[in-house]
Image (spheres, rainbow, N blue to C red):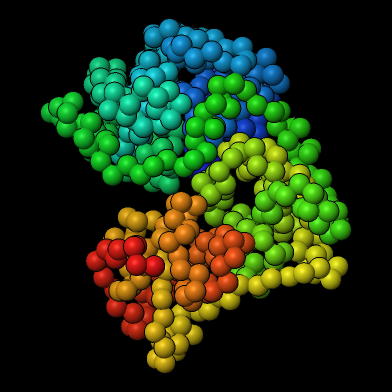
């Protein structure tokens, strides 16, 4: 028996490969499915099932492509949703044979109504592991407010109540020595308090997970689970619909996106189609020179989730600027969150654009030492674009918080006539913020290189946990 967790850090997502006696299953695969096919070939195994724990919101699953390429059967838990592809809708308690193993579906509504866990039995019938999807995480449980974005009458209170029942009646009675295998870890927006650990025993979770407290009432559970939830990223309901209805083949998405464009061709497509020009280089390379009106979201960060958060429509057409050799990686990571309409990339990268004599823009980025010197002779305005929770925890006294997460709604609050020094934790989000506003006519933004991390090291800044209002921008 082989049980392998395949973890993707940028999405904090865990897929699973289980194999026994020449048969295999994949649980919650990502969009690009070839790695799973290759893994099965290594064991000379046939992928028999693709088990989905629910209709995912934070990524587009690879279930449709994987089934088409391998002949595997797609399995979902009990649901009234009609899918746009062939799938087996299992009943609660239905069992599936995989080699010498047995896998039992346990219906656990709450995160979504079709949410299900998969209980793994070895060849002797002993319970070995529980694949919990977004029902139970390490240190947390799935947020119960996502399905209401697709089905209006499923309120978060109703879903939270369902989740309470699922945890108490279906999961907590199971053996303490079971290994819990969740679909996400720390950094995912599908929960709020996830551990950096990606597996644990069920018994330890009963002791340490706030949501599994034995004497917790349903009312206390609902209040605790809903407390502190921030609105989910806008792409979540769009990804859910893609996972229900189906989507374009990944191979075709890759073929279209890998179209290499000369600077002249790139400019022509940009002028004709009016796509978003997405520059995925690191923040400081972008600051030193970029194509006017392009947006910087660096590939070496939480790239896919930030694209999904900041670009409203997954159908949006995109042109790419990447570091040469990373085009395929960027297209893949875009497709994971449903952005399939990449029109091509700039052949030769930004250097080719400069060499062609095309127009170039820059954004000023200064280290903290320069900022400290400026403070000696002038008053400065600091714009902190970290999340509200980060800002509340600690920030520079006098800074104003305008979180990057909600900049599309709050952009008008930033006074164009003021000069703002923009900071985040380390300089990634501040450049994303500055590039977004520069493309919309904000010319007085200066990035703080090194961000809050470097500012904390300087004695020139007074820190506070006082929450500044955002109404006096």
Q: Quadrant of residue 204?
A: top left
Q: Residue at x 17, y 32 (%)?
A: 220
Q: Quadrant of the C terminus?
A: bottom left
**Residue 305 higher or lower than 132, as above or below:** below
The number of numbered discs placed on residues in the rendered structure image is: 0
Vertical comparison of 191 with 155: above or below? below
Where does residue 133 sit, x and y in percent of width and height? 43, 28
Q: Is residue 373 above or below residue 245?
A: below
Q: Is residue 3 visible?
A: no
Q: Viewer-proximal residue, 53 or 417?
A: 417
Q: Where is residue 239 shown, x and y percent of the image?
A: 54, 32
The residue sitting at 62% across, 15% down in the picture is 85
Residue sitting nearer the eye, 420 or 64? 420
Pick the residue in front: 409 or 220: 409
> Observer-nearest residue: 403 or 97?
403
Q: Is residue 64 left or right of residue 255?
A: left
In this rendering, the answer to whether 418 lies above or below 427 is below
| Res 94 → quadrant | top left
Tell me if I can see residue 306 in this picture.
yes
Residue at image point 77% right, 69% down: 359
Residue 75's spot in the image, x, y percent? 53, 15
Q: Position of residue 174 (x, y in %)?
A: 28, 19
Q: Residue furthest bottom?
A: 377
Looking at the image, which residue is at 65% across and 69% down? 285
Horizontal relation, residue 376 to residue 241: left or right: left
């Amino acid at each position: 028996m082989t049980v392998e967790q395949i973890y993707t850090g940028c999405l904090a997502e865990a897929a699973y490969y289980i194999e026994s006696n020449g048969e295999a299953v994949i649980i919650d695969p990502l969009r690009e499915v070839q790695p799973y096919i290759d893994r099965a070939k290594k064991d000379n195994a046939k992928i028999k099932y693709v088990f989905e724990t629910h209709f995912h919101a934070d990524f587009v699953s690879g279930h449709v492509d994987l089934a088409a390429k391998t002949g595997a059967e797609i399995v979902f838990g009990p649901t009234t949703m009609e899918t746009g592809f062939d799938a087996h809708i299992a009943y609660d308690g239905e069992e599936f044979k995989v080699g010498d193993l047995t896998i039992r579906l346990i219906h656990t509504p709450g995160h979504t109504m079709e949410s299900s866990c998969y209980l793994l039995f070895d060849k002797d019938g002993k319970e070995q592991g529980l694949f919990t999807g977004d029902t139970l995480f390490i240190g947390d449980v799935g947020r119960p407010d996502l399905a209401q974005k697709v089905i209006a009458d499923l309120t978060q209170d109703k879903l939270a109540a369902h989740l309470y029942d699922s945890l108490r009646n279906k999961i907590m009675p199971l053996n303490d020595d079971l290994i819990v295998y969740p679909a996400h870890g720390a950094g995912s927006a599908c929960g709020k308090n996830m551990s950096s650990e990606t597996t644990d025993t069920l018994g330890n979770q009963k002791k340490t997970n706030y949501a599994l407290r034995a004497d917790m009432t349903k009312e206390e559970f609902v209040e605790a689970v809903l407390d502190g939830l921030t609105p989910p990223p806008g792409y979540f309901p769009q990804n859910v619909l893609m996972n229900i209805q189906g989507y374009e083949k990944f191979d075709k998405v890759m073929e279209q996106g890998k179209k290499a464009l000369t600077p002249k061709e790139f400019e022509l497509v940009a002028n004709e189609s009016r796509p978003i020009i997405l520059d995925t280089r690191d923040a400081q390379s972008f600051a030193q020179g970029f194509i006017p009106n392009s947006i910087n979201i660096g590939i070496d960060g939480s790239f896919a989730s930030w694209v999904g958060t900041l670009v409203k429509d997954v159908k949006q057409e995109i042109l790419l600027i990447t570091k040469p050799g990373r085009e395929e990686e960027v297209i893949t990571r875009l497709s994971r969150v449903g952005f399939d309409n990449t029109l091509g990339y700039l052949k030769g990268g930004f250097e080719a654009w400069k060499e062609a004599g095309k127009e170039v823009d820059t954004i000023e980025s200064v280290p903290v030492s320069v900022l400290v010197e400026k403070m000696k002779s002038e008053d400065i305005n600091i714009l902190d674009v970290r999340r509200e929770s980060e800002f509340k925890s600690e920030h520079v006294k006098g800074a104003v918080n305008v979180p990057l997460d909600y900049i599309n709604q709050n952009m008008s609050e930033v006074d164009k006539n003021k000069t703002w020094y923009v900071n985040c934790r380390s300089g990634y989000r501040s450049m994303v913020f500055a590039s977004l506003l520069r493309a919309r006519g904000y010319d007085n933004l200066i990035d703080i290189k090194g961000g809050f991390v470097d500012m904390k090291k300087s004695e020139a800044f007074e820190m506070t946990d006082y929450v500044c209002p955002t109404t006096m921008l």
